[in-house]
Image: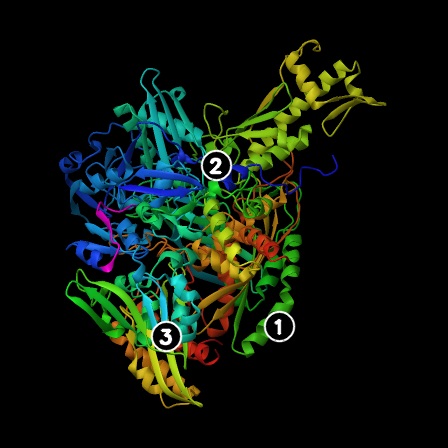
Amino acid sequence: MQVSMTVNGVAQEADVDPRTLLVHFLREALDLTGTKIGCDTSQCGACTVHLNGKVLKSCTLLAVQADGCEVTTIEGLAEGGEHHPMQTAFWENHGLQCGYCTPGMIMASAAFVRDNPGASEAEIRHYLEGNICRCTGYHNIVKAVKQVADSAAGA
Amino acid sequence: MWPNTFDYARAGSVDEALALIGDEGKFLAGGHSLLPVMKLRLAAPEQLVDIGGIDSLRGISANGGLTIGATTTHAEIADSADVRAICSGLASACGQVGDQAVRNFGTIGGNIAHADPASDPPTVLVACGATINIQGAGGARSVGAEDFFVDLFETDLEDGELITSVSLPDCSDCQCAYVKFPHPASRYAIVGVAVCLKMDGGTCAQADVAVGGATVKAVKCGGAEAALAGSTLDDAAVGAAAEAVKADIADWLAGDIAYPESYRQQMAGVFLRRAIAAATTG
Amino acid sequence: MTTRIFGSGIKRREDPRLITGEARYTDDIKLPGVLHMAVVRSPYAHANIVGIDSSAAEAMEGVVAVFTGDDVDLAGIPTAWLIPDSDLKTPEHPALAKGKVRYVGDGVAIVLADDRYRAQDAADAVVVEYEELPAVIDPEEAAGEGAPLIHDDVEGNIAFRWVMGDRDASDAVFNSADVVVSERILQQRLLPTAMEPRSAMAQYNAATQELTLWCTSQNPHIHRFIISAVTGLNENKVRVIAPEVGGGFGSKIPCYPDEALVSWAAIKLGVPVKWTETRSENYLITIHGRDHVQHVEMAASNDGKLLGVRATVYAGMGGYLSTAAPGIPTILHGLLYVGPYTMDSVFCESIGVMTNGTPTDAYRGAGRPEATFLLERMVDNVARAIDMDPVELRRKNLIPAFEDGYEVATTLIYDSGDYPTAFEKALDMAGYSDFRQAQANALASGRYLGIGVTAYTEMCGLGPSQVAGAVGFQGGLWESATVRVTPTGKVQALIGASPHGQGSETTLAQIIAEELGFPVDDIEVVHGDTTETPMGWGTYGSRTTPVTGAALAHASRKLKDKARVLAAHLMEANVDDIEYADGSFSVRGSPDQAQSIQDVALMAHLAWNMPEGMDPGFEESQFYDPPNFVYPFGTHIAIVEVDAETGEVELQRYIAVDDCGPQINPEIVAGQIHGGVVQGAAQALCEGAIYSDDGQLLTGSMMDYCMPKADMFPNFELGETVTPSPHHPVGVKGVGETGTIASTPTVYNAVLDALAPLGVKQIDMPLTSAKVWGAIQAASANGGGN
């Protein structure tokens, strides 16, 4: 089945088996392998992307459902060759170790702070319930997100 | 994991969706209830009819009560000023479904068609006396939420029928709350309690109570309601309701290996007290 | 240089590729014409295979081949830790089951297809007829009379029986002690859950007979020789590449059937073959951790002297013996029974038992968390029995500070330690004495606060190879490294270890920068490819910084020695007059005359003007075999509140004071502790694999297996003391596992402390709200607290 969408600003068109999950379409058809798969049950958030600006677990949507949509993946988050502030904050605050959850973590956090500038630490921790990290104990992830949230609020 | 093969079709209207759907077909809205079970190959429909693009199924209208289109997302409901004003318990419940990514794409219609007993919105729909509006090849019908949820993952929906919207009465003069004890792994409800209290001065004129999570379906709790109605919600009345609610759900208990039925039943009492406290302290 | 690079929490050199999604993990690598492998797995825990019909699967679109155990001519998957004097049995572990399956997930057949969806469709279409057999999961039950026999050649399901210490001497201590406390401790099965599932892709070149295997490995050189052994290919024809690897925690140490099967299929079919597990598959087939049933006793005097500890441990091995499995509940466990205390009597009998569960193996801490937990649990029990404050009891028994060697009853010689200082520091940070008052006040208003205090030391930086040999490890435990400087003065450091999230590319570069004065940004650490890197035994056991780091320090010092001689020659000075500072060699008394390390590197490459007898080039290698383990230590404290109405536990504060010697990168050290603490605390609070009686894994996904989440934890309060290891060139000790080792008993004891007034004395982990609530109800029915 024919599907077309804009991914990281580039129009893409492909013929897909309807059962193809969006995450597999991104990874296999478009070779955008920054988006990861860490569970089968929509829990871990490694596959988080933005669909029409909203966070989405791309393992829980068919590629055909994204027809006509705009998708942003971790590869498309930086603008003009500059890291997104959330990417910078993760780097500066040691918010990652093995890096596997990181693209999803950054995509989720970037959208959260955009929508919730000035979010508290408790709000950040609650929001991140949909993104699982096995390495960092979350401490430095929360610190990174808080830094961007504070900065977005002009604090 | 990933789904089995299926035929896929997009419907532009409710009529088209009803015409397209076959015997072994399922309607697909956000897919956030259906795709997870298809990925685990616990469900393998031969056909999906995508209703996500049907404009008439989406949106919230305040018309005394509320009418919420079936493909309205949890996030849209949680964030809606109308829903917060008219049925704050539903806004609260929808705001506690899954996580933000799930709420962004999961829909109210898909949620209730799936009828997961540990999901949040059905408990409020049952407590608040919502009506589920259904369209089939034979025409439209409406069924009360309490009758809609039949058993574990089982509803009153017939094959080929489509949920078009959910209607709620005006609860704006009630004190409503939905309080959830989330399962630490899945974040579904170990127990979720919805209360809707109509106060007359210091007296509770009417109480509506429903419990989910601890049960195979959202259960309306008449015993607890009776214990509260006519009381001033004093400790004795609330304590009696907390006892009564355990009896109300006794025939419908559900549990898992980590949080067995007996524990959930006891927690229903604890969380009923917390729900009343949340409703009355605003 | 104004700031020392050693000791600086610089940003990680790994991160730019990771935060942009540019890093390539195994499943991200594409090869044209690749076939996808799906494995038909047993739905039964224990069954005979009666027949396999793959005809329908073979006929499906895109399917190239289906193979069963009879088709696959691979040698068995070996066990590589053969504990001596333990009557060890090593039952055969075929890559695909032959005749019988022994756990849910055991591989029965493989399907090769042009697409992973189709491969799974076809795997589902393979019809296997089974004759189900009774199954057993609990290790103590499996070792008992009448348990189903899992391997014909493992009598009574007992794979080994390892004894440490003198039973009679232990009896004498326990028989004459004032106080003996005992507890049956369940170290529940844990699912390691590295966020990247395992993956393997193999490509075979028939002309050169070379196999390349990309796989999720913590130790590609070990994978190379095991793959060589099972396929029969010469080891120099096997190249194993561990590209970006997304966490391991021990679960990517073993060589599994899957890596062998993609290799075999790639050779057989002449096309590349890839397999990536799903999380559901991961939970069934990738090793589990822990799984001990322990019967533990501790002896003490009435005035609080700890006299001895002893335990009988039933350790579940699962359906087969995984790569390092026998070493975990034995060497890595019993040898830690003294912990940080002056305790003279230890005894352990550890019984490795085959069960119908998933094979177990090393999981973060590997044996040492299970030892530290039982020790700390029993110390709290002794404190309660003699009515002494648990902190005071620990204080009385801590080994005093020592700088160079302290032999304990387990025969280990701890390298260095100052346990009392770390202990008091943590208590100060926590405000221990104030807390006890706050706890009493809270109790008066019906709130249940608790505190847990753990003093620990552990053995890591595995380890001297002689010791490895003596305890049956089928390998060495040294590391090697090459520091290679290019003519333009840029550094490539090639290491045999294989980091996968630890930040070693940064930490190790900081060691080289410190030793040689190169800017850290000019240093690349190359790892993970057996063709590009020198031999090494891998990244596990908190050993990469201590062992590889030492190899790099020594190689760097060799280079510095060479540079000093060459610089002297170039400046026509006496070597003894050469001074070195911050990457520059100068002649004493003539500071204007100087040669930078980069100048020297260039001249060494050009070799136009070398001192007599000096070879050209600027590269040195070092094989480093550590003389001893390293023994980091510290004290962790948890403060919790229990909601007695629901049984919910809130972890309110967590204080960790750890001593891993000088910290090369404090931010990376902190990250290791944060992550380790959460992993260990989650064992106490929420994680646990649960099987049904017939061997079905009931916690088969993250819906049921509770992974720790951000909102379950506070920010951590970290402190440190610095006690260098006397035998390490830069004094460092490992820190990858300390958090996991210390935190489980810390959190557990805090919860039990909170519940003490209610009369609750023991709860099996994890401390879910349902279990805590149940324990409160049961205690209340028995008359409650005192």
Q: Is residue C674 above or below residue C18?
A: below
Q: Residue shown at 23%/35% (left/top)? A: C111
Q: Is residue C639 visible?
A: yes
Q: Position of residue C321 (x, y in %)?
A: 34, 40
Q: Quadrant of the N terminus of chain C?
A: top right
Q: Please identify, in this view, whether the residue under mark 1 or under mark 2 is nearer the observer.
A: 2
Q: Is residue B2 magenta?
A: yes
Front-most of C319 and B152? B152
Q: Which residue is mark 1?
A: C437
Q: Residue shown at 42%/49% (left/top)? A: A48
- Res. C430 image quadrant: bottom right
Are there few (<14), some (14-19), or many (20+) residues within 10 Å of tag 1?
few
Chain bearing tag 3 is B
Chain bearing tag 2 is C
Give the residue type that dot 1 points to: Gln
Q: Secondary structure at mark 2?
A: loop
Total numbered labels placed on residues in the image = 3
Are there few (<14), some (14-19), or many (20+) residues within 10 Å of tag 2?
some
Front-most of C427 and C344? C427
Per the picture, the main secondary structure of the magenta-coloured stretch is loop
Q: Is residue C240 magenta?
A: no
Chain bearing tag 1 is C
Q: Which residue is mark 2?
A: C22
Q: Position of residue C234 (x, y in %)?
A: 36, 20
Front-most of C556 and B125? B125
Q: Which mark is residue B194?
A: 3
Q: Is residue C375 visible?
A: no
Badges 3 and 1, same chain: no
**Magenta stretch bounds:** B1-14
- Res. B108 image quadrant: bottom left
Front-most of C668 and C115? C115
